[in-house]
Image (cartoon, rainbow, N blue to C red):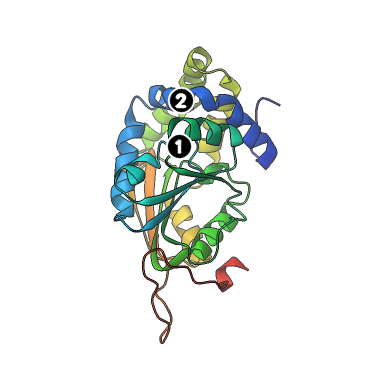
Amino acid sequence: MNRASLEKRPDEVAAMFDDVAPRYDVVNDVLSMGQTRRWRRIVVDAVGAEPGQRVLDLAAGTGTSSEPYADAGIDVVACDFSLGMLKVGKRRRPDIAFVAGDATNLPFADDSFDASTISFGLRNVNEPKKALAEMLRVTRPGGRLVIAEFSQPTVALWRTTYTEYLMRALPAIARKVSSNPDAYVYLAESIRAWPNQDELAGWLAEAGWQDVEYRNLNGGIVAVHRATKAPAAPGEEPLRPGQVRLRRTSAAA
């Protein structure tokens, strides 16, 4: 099957990304008119990781979003469910740890990371609320979450123009530059069906994240959500960067 449905069967979505992996980053740059690089810089700044800390970059694809952390001496784990994406990334950046994993059942211990982040991937998870709970589980107490995702423009006229671009122009451009244009029809449809900024913020709070806030980029085309995990309980020694606490939290139940 070349085009994944909006029901998001994991095997179909993974196969779709496997198929577009070789030219994925180039096509993204074309379709976003070069904005993806700016969005990535904003996410890295929001994560605010320092050398010696450990960051989970979920839905990392070919690892383009992971590279700034590795280049800064930060221990980053690039996790994705598309083996094709991981293969391309590992070939290009053998110094980065690429791990195959399901966002709804992450292969990491509790409290493993100082920060977790996912850029333009939560929308492709079949159970995004479960993924938010899993990221909470693997992030240490007091740690950070940063999500970048396509959202809804805040101005009605701009929202109409953007929707026209998604449903008409984007697939047409993809037919010229992508090996699997149907994947980008799915992309457009999944963006249109995704909840708005406030609804996603509500999901974060529901999953147990605290201090939830978001920043609109490009008039709301993209929103960057930030949140923190509650600090350690009274009497519980805080983790140092890189330490792991082997226990499960109620948020992962």
Toward which corner of the image does residue 185 lie, by quadrant?
top right
- Mark number for residue 32? none
Residue 56 percent across, percent down from the top left:
45, 52
Describe the element under mark 1 as helix, strand or loop: loop
Q: Which residue position is annotated with label 1?
A: 94
- Residue occupying the point 57% across, 41% down: 124
Q: Amino acid at mark 2?
A: Glu
- Residue occupying the point 30% across, 55% down: 51
Mark 2 or mark 1, earlier in chain:
1
Specify few, some or many for label 2: CA neighbours under 10 Å numbering under 14, 14-19, or 20 or more: few
Identity of the residue furthest to the right in this view: 1
Q: Quadrant of the N terminus?
A: top right
Q: Which residue position is annotated with label 2?
A: 164
Q: Is residue 117 visible?
A: yes
Identity of the residue furthest to the top in this view: 176
Residue in the foreground of this view, choosing between 179 and 67: 67
